[in-house]
Image (spheres, rainbow, N blue to C red):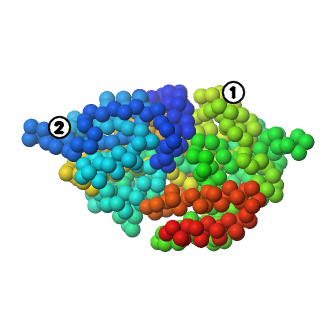
């Protein structure tokens, strides 16, 4: 099935989501305009109709009107036509209430057959026993469905102790964004390493009477929760430096190890020693960040800068570019992954897998993603026609993606680190003190 959304429509849809799209990738939201629509009663378990038709419940939280239309008019009818014994009950909801709805359903014994989840959801769903193991289904899936087509970071994100618990449908790789006009002023090209980024940031920062008027680098291009802003940018340097937040067995925090400290020392030098930006950095003006306004040369983000510029500052589009991830010890990018789960309370796991396989097949996934304004986890769709050149670069960055650890209480563990990072960038803690205090706090929670 071919997507029925043009690139121009994609840009408008994506820009309308703006920050909400970024937050959804984390499974976090501070409020949403998402509509609620249901073709079945919320919380009702699957049942047979007339002894011949089986019902499958599908809960969708990543959507907009165009995506809803694609699901209702293309994707779901195609599944029902191919599987006449099934009827899909689609329920649309919003991120700000979704975790509570899922919890209520499963604790009441009426969890959905298939439901979406955000970037930090896998550990919790597995820990609570709500996600059905899927490895046996993936192993038997037809070759044209292609588990190997999903980027490695997305596969890693949904795997716990060697078992697959979900199928990715959306990724948001974080990579470097820069302004070519600022670089051309200094005869520079886009940086690919930490050292080159520092050189470019120092060459392009502008000051007037000691006040920074243009940032060489911005640690917060907007789009995420305020308390996580600098922490998100830190991941973009930690991964290339070879650092980790938690040990492989999730039993201890590893931020006091040399690669993790090295990444923070680099960022701290940019902010406090080189002073290529004020801290906090420049605030957004309306929908636009400092990058789109020409007030910053570089920063790290997902696909948002391209989408915002095309919608709200089209005269700036030619100057705003995405680059592949930075390299230090390795080339790596932080990767947000949203995914579909099959609920462990489903009465029809085989039918649920048929539907999930259909939802994440290349044609279905491309149609849904083009309508919603998302990047897909499939390598084969990194050059999809609905993507701009910038977003194709961001999609390719997903090949270098590193997801979150699959700990069930990850957001709780992030809090002390985010607070200590703020103190570090204000000069109240050194990088090593920041990491030591964070390790002590996180280990006390583990």
Decide which of tag 2 and tag 1 comes sooner along the chain. 2
Q: Position of residue 258 (x, y in %)?
A: 66, 71
Q: Position of residue 209 (x, y in %)?
A: 91, 42
Residue depicted at 30% across the width and 42% down the height: 58
| Residue positioned 72% across, 47% down in the render | 280
Residue at 58% from the left image edge and 39% from the top image edge:
304
The image shows residue 325 at horizontal and vertical percentages of 62, 53
Query: What residue do we see at 79% from left, 49% from top?
Result: 276
* Residue 81 visible in the shown view: yes
Q: On the picture, is 194 further left or further right than 356?
A: right
Pick the residue in front: 55 or 3.
55
- The x and y percentages for residue 170 are 45, 46
Q: Residues within 10 Å of mark 2 (few under 14, many from 20)?
A: few
Category of crowding for the residue at label 1, using alpha-carbon neighbours closer than 10 angstroms: few (below 14), some (14–19), many (at least 20): few
Query: Height in image: 40 above or below 248?
Result: above
Occupied quadrant, residue 4: top left
- Label 2: which secondary element: loop
Can you say whether 288 is above or below 107 in the image? above
Q: Quadrant where the N terminus lies?
A: top left
> Separation of disc 2 and disc 1 at Cα?
51 Å
Residue picked out by circle 2: 84
The image shows residue 144, relative to residue 268, as above or below, that is: above
Q: Foreground: 12 or 272?
A: 272
Report the side of 354 relative to 364 (left or right): left
Q: Read off the residue under disc 1.
A: 315
Front residue of 81 and 249: 249
Q: Secondary structure at mark 1?
A: helix
């Amino acid at each position: 099935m071919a997507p029925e959304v043009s690139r121009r429509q994609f840009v408008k849809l994506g820009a309308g989501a703006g920050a909400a799209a970024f937050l959804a990738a984390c499974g976090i939201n501070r409020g949403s305009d998402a509509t609620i629509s249901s073709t079945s009663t919320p919380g009702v378990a699957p049942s047979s109709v007339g002894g011949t038709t089986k019902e499958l419940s599908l809960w969708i939280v990543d959507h907009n009107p165009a995506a809803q239309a694609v699901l209702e008019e293309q994707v779901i009818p195609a599944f029902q036509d191919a599987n006449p014994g099934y009827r899909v009950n689609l329920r649309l909801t919003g991120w700000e209430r979704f975790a509570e709805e899922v919890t209520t359903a499963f604790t009441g014994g009426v969890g959905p057959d298939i439901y979406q989840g955000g970037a930090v959801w896998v550990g919790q769903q597995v820990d609570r026993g709500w996600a059905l193991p899927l490895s046996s289904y993936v192993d038997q899936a037809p070759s044209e469905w292609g588990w190997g087509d999903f980027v490695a970071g997305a596969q890693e994100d949904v795997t716990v102790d060697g078992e697959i618990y979900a199928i990715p449908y959306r990724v948001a790789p974080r990579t470097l964004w820069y302004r070519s006009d600022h670089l051309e002023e200094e005869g520079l090209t886009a940086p690919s390493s930490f050292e080159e980024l520092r050189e470019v940031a120092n060459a392009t920062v502008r000051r007037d009477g000691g006040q920074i008027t243009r940032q060489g680098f911005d640690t917060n291009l907007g789009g995420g929760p305020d308390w996580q802003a600098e922490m998100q940018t830190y991941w973009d340097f930690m991964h290339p430096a070879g650092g980790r937040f938690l040990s492989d067995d999730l039993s201890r925090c590893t931020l006091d190890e040399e690669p993790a400290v090295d990444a923070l020392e680099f960022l701290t030098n940019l902010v406090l020693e080189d002073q290529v930006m004020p801290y906090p950095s420049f605030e957004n003006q309306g929908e636009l960040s400092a990058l789109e306004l020409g007030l910053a040369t570089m920063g790290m983000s997902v696909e948002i800068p391209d989408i915002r510029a095309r919608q709200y500052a089209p005269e700036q589009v030619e100057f705003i570019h995405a680059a592949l991830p930075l390299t230090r010890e390795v080339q790596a990018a932080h990767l947000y992954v949203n995914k579909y789960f099959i609920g462990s309370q489903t009465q029809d796991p085989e039918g649920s897998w048929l539907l999930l396989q259909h939802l994440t097949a290349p044609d279905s996934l491309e149609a849904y993603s083009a309508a919603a304004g998302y990047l897909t986890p499939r390598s084969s769709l990194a050059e999809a026609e609905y993507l701009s050149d910038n977003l194709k670069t961001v999609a390719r960055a997903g090949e270098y993606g590193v997801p979150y650890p699959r700990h069930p209480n990850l957001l709780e563990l992030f809090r002390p680190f985010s607070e200590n990072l703020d103190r570090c960038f204000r000069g109240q803690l050194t990088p090593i003190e920041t990491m030591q205090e964070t390790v002590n706090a996180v280990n006390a929670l583990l």
